[in-house]
Amino acid sequence: ERVELRRDTLALAAARVPTLESENDRLRALLGFGSKLQWGFIPAEALQGRGRAEDFTVTLSAGSNAGVREHSLVIAPEGIVGLVQTVDPTMSLVILFAHPDFRVSAISANDSAFGIVQPHVTTSSTTKEASYLRSERYLLEMRGVPFRATLNPGAIIYSSGLGGIYPKGIPVGVVLAEIKTSETWARTYLLRPAVTPTHPR
């Protein structure tokens, strides 16, 4: 019985190893991110079930007691998650990148294209990006890109640092396709967000 108990204990511990390794990898990536950007971090966990019906907000397990302030940047190792909207002593409410009020000044990796990233809103299912309809509510648009600047699918878009909220160099999304608009002086691109909606940690 002792041998069987020990074996079961070891099996349980072994089952937890992949989860712990994954969590350690994310934490190491976040620490590397902080070192690169020279910004400090307040760790927080994303909580669900706070009674809010809003799809594009999330509650964090850290508030003003931990140093969180309104308009604090929220990121994950993959990139931008959102922005703190309201704070109480122990929790914070964050608007995610898909929230209608979200905006971030952005730039391409080679600094050749710049614009403003905001949530993607579809007006017709017959548009070029219709193949992305299943996940369109979480897509982004990079608007106001100078017409002379072209971006290829797969290009990574980063925060530009303009505006003083988001430091330069945080991944925002990846270019999927150009969206045809009536504007003749600028281009608009459809982006897949750097952080997937199911992992806003």
Image (tube, rainbow, N blue to C red):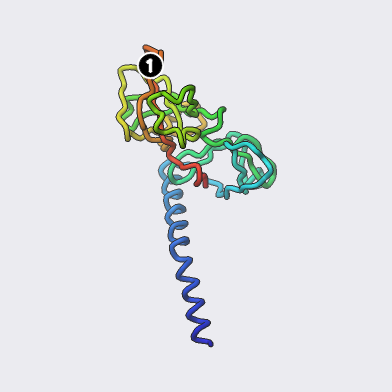
> What is the x, y in percent for residue 143?
43, 22
> What is the x, y in percent for residue 131?
39, 32
Above or below: residue 55 compared with residue 44: above
- Outermost residue toward the front in this view: 126
Residue at (44, 46) in percent of width and height? 77
Above or below: residue 26 compared with residue 158: below
Three-letter code, disc 1: Ala
Q: Nearer the viewer, residue 131 or 38?
A: 131
Residue at (42, 24) in percent of width and height? 126
Please indicate whether residue 129 sits to the left or right of residue 121 in the image. left
> What is the x, y in percent for residue 17?
45, 65
Please indicate whether residue 47 sits to the left or right of residue 134 in the image. right
Mark 1 secondary-structure assignment: strand
Residue at (35, 35) in percent of width and height? 156
Quadrant of the rendered structure where residue 83 is?
A: top right
> Which residue lies under the disc numbered 1?
186
Above or below: residue 159 compared with residue 196: above
Q: Nearer the viewer, residue 21 or 134?
A: 134
Quadrant of the rendered structure where residue 64 is?
A: top right
> What is the x, y in percent for residue 28?
43, 53
Decide: few, some or many residues near mark 1? Use Cα within 10 Å; few <14, some 14-19, many ≥20: some
Residue at (46, 68) in percent of width and height? 15
